[in-house]
Amino acid sequence: MADFGSQVLAALQATINPDDTQRKQAEAFLRKAESNVQFVPILLGIVSQPKTSPIAKQTGAITLKNYIKRGWILDQGHPGSLRPADRKLLKSNLLPMACSGGAAAAAIPQSVRRQFNEALRLISQQDFPEEWPELLPGLVSLLGTGLRAMDLAVITAVLNVANDVFRYFRESFKSNELFTELKLVLETFQQPLSQTFASLQQRHAQAMAANDVSACKLVLRTLRLTMRIFYSLNYQDLPAFFEDNIQSWMTAHLSLISSPMLPPAAAAAAAEDDVAGPGQLLQAAVVQN
């Protein structure tokens, strides 16, 4: 299988070859390789290995996402071509890989994580919650790990996944099935979301007091994700939990609208910029809520 792994790696690198013939040959090889039981494990290994080139990581992640998109489900709800063992492997590995911290995080660049997030969204649309009950506990566990260490990279990664998955609630029509799924998500995620929001507000206040512009921007980007998730979870109706805690949430919303987002010098520079910065994007998300 080592030879097969080398062939897959070479094909991934060849998919960006400017030579049309070589590129098509590589693409054809990868499509044929999907029938090999080692294809998915090898792709996961390629994209997570520190020594793999950035190009191979990126093309490997795209190949994996596209395979999931084609093979997870067929028309009319019938299972696609992905083998049960591969489905289990992907569910077990994609979430921790997308939300990894420390040295593991350095091995998986943002461009790869974005592909993982999309793959997780595709899988969750089909399998959550009945066929993937581990998704929510996994998100909450990883979020708790990030909060205990105040590791913004992990917190942001988890919230990115949650935002992509929960976007479903603002893109779907009302139905009993939808509200059943929303109830499950709320019961599991509403309290961790509130805790995360409060912790991030405190971290932003600390960064402002320290005049730490880079930390402020990072926290603002992460706070925006909490606002997008809040929007998704409240889109269909106002849940009881958020209704009971509406004063604290709306007070925080007002604070985010009226308080400085960056230290004075950085705020003045941002005001002159034609491109919306993290503070402006956060405030736009607050207004939309």
Image (cartoon, rainbow, N blue to C red):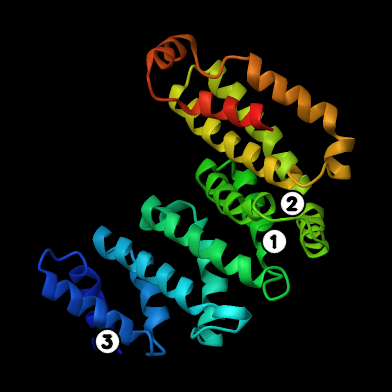
In the image shown, does 249 or 122 lie closer to the viewer?
122
Residue 54 rendering spot, x and y as whole percentages: 27, 58
Q: Is residue 136 left or right of residue 122?
A: right
In the image shown, does 74 or 159 lie closer to the viewer?
74
> Earlier along the polypeptide chain: callout 2 or callout 1?
1
Residue 260 rendering spot, x and y as whole percentages: 57, 14
Location of residue 243 with respect to 164 vertically, above or below: above
In the image shown, does 114 or 181 lie closer to the viewer?
181
Residue 24 rendering spot, x and y as whole percentages: 19, 75
Query: Would you name the residue on which mark 3 appears?
Result: 4
Q: How many marks?
A: 3
Instruction: Specify the quadrant of the image occupied by residue 246.
Output: top right
Amino acid type, label 2: Phe
In the image shown, does 213 or 82 lie closer to the viewer?
82
Other residues around mark 2 within 10 Å, as few (<14) / some (14–19) / many (≥20): some
Amino acid type, label 1: Leu
For label 3, the SS is: helix
Query: Would you name the residue on which mark 1 appears?
Result: 136
Q: Is residue 79 left or right of residue 29?
A: right
Amino acid type, label 3: Phe
Question: Who's the residue at 25% across and 60% down the image?
Answer: 55
Question: Who's the residue at 63% across and 44% down the image?
Answer: 147
Q: Do tag 2 and tag 1 residues touch (Cβ < 8 Å)?
A: yes
Q: Label 3 vs label 2: CA separation?
A: 42 Å
Question: Who's the residue at 36% across and 70% down the image?
Answer: 63
Query: Would you name the residue on which mark 2 appears?
Result: 189
Q: Is residue 253 left or right of residue 216?
A: right
Location of residue 42 with respect to 215 vertically, above or below: below
Question: Who's the residue at 33% across and 71% down the image?
Answer: 46
